[in-house]
């Protein structure tokens, strides 16, 4: 199948790639742009390991075609830290031991950042429901929820 | 080791520093199995049987081979013949031979220049099947007239005349079981069933393999144990293990499922055929669920005798388990663990390992223990109900202590079951008030823990920091705990120790990160290695001071003169020794290897409060408490994480997760939407209490914490549901549909 030229913005940088029309955005990020921080856990939209935002909307990048990404602005885990400065969520995840294997972590961080942008003071229940699409098999979620709540509190304090 | 004489002196052990691999894992930089790429790399796709049981009449690969960009196609014809025992099982599971033995069994594999091309070509492989009768349920498979998976698969343990699918039989116990039951005031017997569940690691299996004409190869694999991958892949392909060099990637969860091979040897076989180009294979989620690891399913009869005061007089377990189309269901472990928490003068265990048309089971966190506990801890609770006894009191009354003979034979060393039960009893959750349709359930769980083959090296760097090389992949923070123990032994800051997980060429054989052994065994070997380096540093200081090495002692990261005639020298720090080690005798390092013993077993006890909706049968968890003896928690945050993660896997097993087969033996739910593992909104916080009864067989008292946590949730939830709505669930999962049916049946 002939490839399609896609121009888009990823983590605030202009990028371009050639995508097979069957390739997902996740495939394109990982295989064409070398951004392997987004993970595939299912390929069917059920695990959230591939979470990214497209024009500010949280999506499963395994459910979007790469060719649909043209002209959008995409944020992935690789764009979360500002230079050397980690996002408060990233720091809190390390501090709270909020991951074991770390495979779900990029997707959960991207999803949690999106939550806090929309709702800076979520309740525990709101965090749990927002992250219900992000599977973690290692932690039982306890420390993840605590890390998100703590990061939210710190960010509120800083704001 | 008394409980506190060590802990008061510990500076790093027991603290909660950032894990050394944390930064890589929050930035997306950590490289997992599928994150690798190499020049000339090909991508592979696997052709899988859509049938549960079928004779393979013919495989035609010509159309696939003709596709431009396809570089190799392999079938079983490309594998060596003549393998026996487990090597044959592994080979047969990697690639079907005469028969496809389960839905999803690999029959061919294709390597091409892109993964889309490989998938397209895989669809062009034509396989002619003759469909055979199949069986997937363990109670069906053990019937004399069941479809036979494989003649002659039984080992010597199986008595003459047993059904053909029984491949292993066991029988053990002690005392006089009938006399024991005769002494009891109440004897009850019931049958319990658990369905197969999957480890459910979020990272699907992934690897890249390269094998040249010279028989030398390399692999990059997401695995819990790269020496196992090396040995097994070599055996399946008829190579010498020494010819393969295997590098572990970061691993996205394993829980036992990544201690063995599935498609890994295919990457090598395809690479060889493709002229030595590296071949990458990444499984899809459906492939993971259909063809890798689940645990066994079980059907279990349990009988217990109890006196009016709760004293146990006798117990009997007869377990039937299927672990797929190959021997290896953990029926032995299930039996060992079932009654392990209790003093039992009279006990009998009988077990059957049964073949069925399902994928070859792999280890899953405390293999066998959750099933055994579900049966034994459920029945015990039912009997407490009947006699009006407090289930916690009964457990305490019968609890094993140091020196007791275990239900499965050996005497217990130092154990912390009583301490664990006491901590459970004293936790505020046990006093929380319960409303209508709410109930509390408790249960215990057991795991042996494990030492095993271990090889670790450490070296002092010129700047006085330490590098530790271990062979146990870091699944959940073991780099941090090994660094903490090394820092403690050396007396240098935690940040000055770097722990590397190294490839197979760098150390002797290491067993995988399994059986809760990484922190115990690699930690113990790291401390032994460190002690060697310390001895050498003391010698260097002694030489400089011109005193005997015995007159030097190591403390707070420095050599100190000690003893009456040592002289009065200022301490010589690790930095001072390290910076000039080139002139004082060369590198300073330590190494330890062995088959490590000194393992300390671990008991846990959980308490769960649930609310069951009588309209829908849905169980909501209100509160969850995990109490477990860690021996000592090296990094308590990751110990809590193991407790919480294990408990939630057990909760999933108890309430939701199951393998669903249709009448053709095809798996109906090979996606996460339908194989539903717990999500964040299903759960409350998971409360934990770390009990520390140090293991005298480890320098810091470690027992191992990974396994036990998955076991108690199965019975604890069944016990809680009975207390909430009065129905006794003996068949997992306790899904809303089943609980509702039971409530309806109860209400008549
Ligand atoms: S990989 Fe996209 S949701 Fe699982
Ligand atoms: S930390 Fe392993 S899946 Fe979440």
Image (cartoon, rainbow, N blue to C red):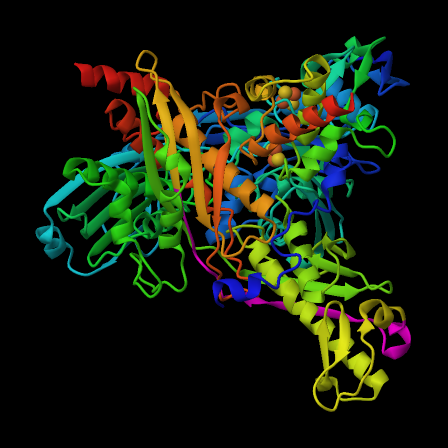
- Which quadrant of the figure has residue B459? bottom right
Q: Quadrant where the C terminus of chain B lies? A: top left
The magenta stretch is: B580-605
Question: In the image, is B453 to the left or to the right of B375?
Answer: right
User: Measured from the top left, where is residue B356 in percent x and y?
Assistant: 37, 36
Q: Is residue B1 above or below residue B732?
A: below
Residue at horizontal 83 percent and vertical 88 percent from the top:
B546
User: Measured from the top left, where is residue B347 in percent x and y?
Assistant: 22, 55
Question: In the image, is B104 to the left or to the right of B615?
Answer: right
Task: Say whether residue B381 is visible.
Answer: yes
Q: Is residue B93 above or below residue B473?
A: above
User: Measured from the top left, where is residue A67 in percent x and y?
Assistant: 79, 11
Residue at horizontal 23 percent and vertical 42 percent from the top:
B302
Q: Nearer the viewer, residue A125 or B336?
A: A125
Task: Say whether residue A40 is visible.
Answer: no
Query: On the rendering, which quadrant does ligand 1 occupy?
Result: top right
- Which quadrant of the figure has residue B506? bottom right
Residue furthest front as drawn: A157
Question: In the image, is B553 to the left or to the right of B596?
Answer: right
Residue at horizontal 43 percent and vertical 33 percent from the top:
B624
Q: Is residue B343 above or below residue B382?
A: below
User: Measured from the top left, where is residue B249 in percent x and y?
Assistant: 70, 43
Q: Nearer the viewer, residue B226 or A132?
A: A132
Q: Is residue B592 magenta?
A: yes
Question: In the image, is B332 to the left or to the right of B728?
Answer: right
């Amino acid at each position: 199948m002939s490839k399609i030229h896609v121009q888009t913005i990823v983590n605030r940088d202009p990028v371009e790639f050639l995508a097979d029309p069957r390739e997902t955005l996740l495939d394109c990020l990982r295989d064409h742009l070398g951004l392997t921080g987004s993970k595939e856990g299912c390929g069917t939209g059920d695990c959230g390991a591939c979470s990214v935002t497209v024009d500010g909307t949280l999506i499963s990048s395994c459910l979007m075609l790469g060719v649909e990404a043209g002209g959008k602005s995409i944020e992935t885990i690789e764009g979360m830290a500002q230079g050397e400065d980690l996002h408060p969520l990233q720091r809190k995840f390390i501090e709270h031991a909020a991951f074991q294997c770390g495979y779900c972590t990029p997707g959960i961080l991207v999803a949690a950042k999106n939550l806090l942008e929309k709702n800076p003071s979520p309740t525990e229940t709101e965090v749990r429901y927002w992250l219900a699409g992000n599977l973690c098999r290692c932690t039982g979620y306890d420390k993840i929820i605590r890390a998100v709540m703590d990061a939210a509190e710190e960010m509120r304090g800083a704001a | 080791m008394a409980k506190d004489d060590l802990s008061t002196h510990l500076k790093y052990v027991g603290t909660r520093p950032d894990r050394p691999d944390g930064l890589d894992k929050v930035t997306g930089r950590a490289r997992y199995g599928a994150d690798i790429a190499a020049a000339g790399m090909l991508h592979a796709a696997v052709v899988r049987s859509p049938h549960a049981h079928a004779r393979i009449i013919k495989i035609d690969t010509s159309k696939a081979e003709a596709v431009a960009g396809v570089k190799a196609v392999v079938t079983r014809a490309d594998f060596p013949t003549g393998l026996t025992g487990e090597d044959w099982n592994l080979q047969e599971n990697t690639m079907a031979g005469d028969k496809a033995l389960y839905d999803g069994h690999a029959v061919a594999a294709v390597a091409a220049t892109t993964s889309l091309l490989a998938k397209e070509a895989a669809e062009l492989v034509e396989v002619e099947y003759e469909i055979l009768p199949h069986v997937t349920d363990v109670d069906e498979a053990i019937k004399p007239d069941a479809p036979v998976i494989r003649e002659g698969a039984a080992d010597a343990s199986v008595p003459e005349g047993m059904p053909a699918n029984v491949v292993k039989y066991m029988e053990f116990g002690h005392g006089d079981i009938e006399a024991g039951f005769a002494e009891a005031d109440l004897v009850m017997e019931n049958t319990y069933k658990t369905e197969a569940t999957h480890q459910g690691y979020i990272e699907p299996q992934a690897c890249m393999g390269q094998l040249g004409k010279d028989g030398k190869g390399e692999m990059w694999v997401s695995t819990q144990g790269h020496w196992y991958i090396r040995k097994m892949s070599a055996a399946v392909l008829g190579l010498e293990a020494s010819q393969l060099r295997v590098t572990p990637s970061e691993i996205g969860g394993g829980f036992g499922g990544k201690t063995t091979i599935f498609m890994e040897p295919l990457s090598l076989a395809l690479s060889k055929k493709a002229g030595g180009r590296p071949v990458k294979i990444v499984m899809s989620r459906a492939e993971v669920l259909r063809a890798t690891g689940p645990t066994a399913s079980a059907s279990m009869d349990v009988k217990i005798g109890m006196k009016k005061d709760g004293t146990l007089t006798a117990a009997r377990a007869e377990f039937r388990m299927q672990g797929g189309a190959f021997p290896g269901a953990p029926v032995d472990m299930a039996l060992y663990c079932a009654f392990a928490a209790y003093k039992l003068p009279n006990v009998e265990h009988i077990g059957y390992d049964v073949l069925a048309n399902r994928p070859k089971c792999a280890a899953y966190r405390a293999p066998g223990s959750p099933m055994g506990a579900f049966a034994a801890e459920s029945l015990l609770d039912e009997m407490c109900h009947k006699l009006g006894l407090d289930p916690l009191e009964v457990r305490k009354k019968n609890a094993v202590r140091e020196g007791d003979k275990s239900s499965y034979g050996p005497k217990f060393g130092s154990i912390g079951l009583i301490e664990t039960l006491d901590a459970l009893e004293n936790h505020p959750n046990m006093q929380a008030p319960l409303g209508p349709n709410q109930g509390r359930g408790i249960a215990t769980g057991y795991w042996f823990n494990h030492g095993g083959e271990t090889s670790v090296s450490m070296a002092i760097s010129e700047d006085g920091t330490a590098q530790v090389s271990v062979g146990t992949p870091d699944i959940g923070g073991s780099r941090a705990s090994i660094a903490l123990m090394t820092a403690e032994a050396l007396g240098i800051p935690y940040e000055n120790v770097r722990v590397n997980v190294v490839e197979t060429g760098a150390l002797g054989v290491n067993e995988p990160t399994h059986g809760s052994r990484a922190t115990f065994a690699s930690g113990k070997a790291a401390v032994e290695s460190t002690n060697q380096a310390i001895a050498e540093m003391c010698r260097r200081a002694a030489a400089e001071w011109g005193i005997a090495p015995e007159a030097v002692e190591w403390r707070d990261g420095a050599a100190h003169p000690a003893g009456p005639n040592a002289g009065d020298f200022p301490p010589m720090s690790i930095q001072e020794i390290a910076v000039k080690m080139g002139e004082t005798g060369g590198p300073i390092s330590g190494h330890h290897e062995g088959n490590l013993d000194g393992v300390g077993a671990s008991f846990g006890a959980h308490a769960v409060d649930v609310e069951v909706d009588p309209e829908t049968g849905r169980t909501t968890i209100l509160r969850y408490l995990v109490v477990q003896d860690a021996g000592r928690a090296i990094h308590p945050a990751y110990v809590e994480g193991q407790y919480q993660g294990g408990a939630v896997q057990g909760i999933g097993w108890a309430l939701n997760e199951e393998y669903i087969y249709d009448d053709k033996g095809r798996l109906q739910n090979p996606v996460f939407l339908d194989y539903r593992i717990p999500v964040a909104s299903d759960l409350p916080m998971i409360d934990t209490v770390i009990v520390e009864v140090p293991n005298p067989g480890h320098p810091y008292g470690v027992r191992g914490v990974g396994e036990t946590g998955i076991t108690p949730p199965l019975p604890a939830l069944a016990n809680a549901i009975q207390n909430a709505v009065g129905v006794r669930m003996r068949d997992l999962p306790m899904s809303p549909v089943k609980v509702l049916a039971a409530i309806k049946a109860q209400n008549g």
